[in-house]
Amino acid sequence: MASALRTLDPELLALAKIECNEEQSQREAIVATLQVWITKSPHLKAPTDEQLILAFLRRCRYSQEETKRRFDNYYSLRSVFPEVLGSRQVDEALLTQLQRGVHVIPARPVSPQGPRVIISPFRQIDPKKSNPREAFKLVFILLELLALECDNASISGLIWVVDARDVTMEQMMQYDPFLLKKAFALVDQCLPLRFVEIHMINMRREGQTIFNFVTKFLPSKLPFKFVVHKKSEDLYEHIPREAMTIEYGGTNGYQAEALDYWRQRLLDNKDYLARDAQYGTNEKLRVGLASAWSNGELNGMSGSFRKLELD
């Protein structure tokens, strides 16, 4: 059977070798080895899609043991994070969330071999109509689709731009520390893509206070660059204008065009995401040590920002 893995252009191929230890002549055999491992792991029920496995391999710089651990984490976390990783149906609620512009993925990467960009204007999360869990659910669905279809994302990584302009205290208070801790664990230990930079722009005073509070629950050394900017213009000291949408003074298409594209990608993958409900782990069948999540690694942290006093 012919491989479904995409052929890379010479520049991206060279970058994959540098960034991910990828050898074009070996990747099909390594992917096939991991497919066999998935099917023979009694506790693990997961897809064996070649492109998804390849994204995990690239994220782990082709360490097969690290890839197995991250892949296992991705599917075992679902049992303790169902509000974000469960029920991934492409329904009107999800499509409406997308059309609000909560997350926008512009058409082009930063450069022909550069990272993909995600823009999240959090003011679009209306507390009366949705909540952060629904926004997180949408973004992690979009990230999995990026892992499946975008080699720039799996090789060069992601840049996330979070726009805090006009965000209200009511919106901020929805982000409880437990939700943020689980979301960070998903990014850090499970996701088949890596964030290289996260930029927060247009941060108001209340937002800065919340940011300082949130960072207390994150590791002292983050695996990506995290920069807070008071103005959106400051962002362009770090990334080119060509990476951002026209609404932000860039040249990377209009936001509406990006939303239309990803709406169609969600519809095209409706069956794929519907099948997702069957995947996960059965810890009773696991051979060896239990997963970190079933051992309660994420327990013991609750509450919200409602108790936080502002200056």
Image (cartoon, rainbow, N blue to C red):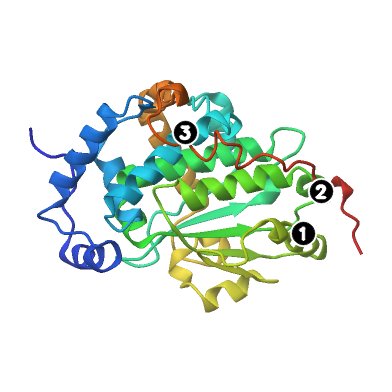
- What number is the disc on residue 308? none
> Which image quadrant for residue 19?
bottom left
| Residue beneath disc 1 | 213
Q: Residue at x 28, y 32 (%)?
A: 38
| Residue beneath disc 3 | 76
Q: Amino acid at mark 2?
A: Phe
Q: In x, y percent, where is residue 63? A: 28, 54
| Residue beneath disc 2 | 305
- Residue 235's place in the image compared with 281, above or below, is below
**Which of 3 and 249 lies nearest the eye of the viewer?**
3
- Residue 34's place in the image compared with 246, above or below, is above
Q: In x, y percent, where is residue 222? A: 56, 64
> Which image quadrant for residue 116?
bottom left
Q: Amino acid at mark 1?
A: Phe
Q: Residue at x 36, y 46 (%)?
A: 147
* Residue placed furthest toward the bottom: 237
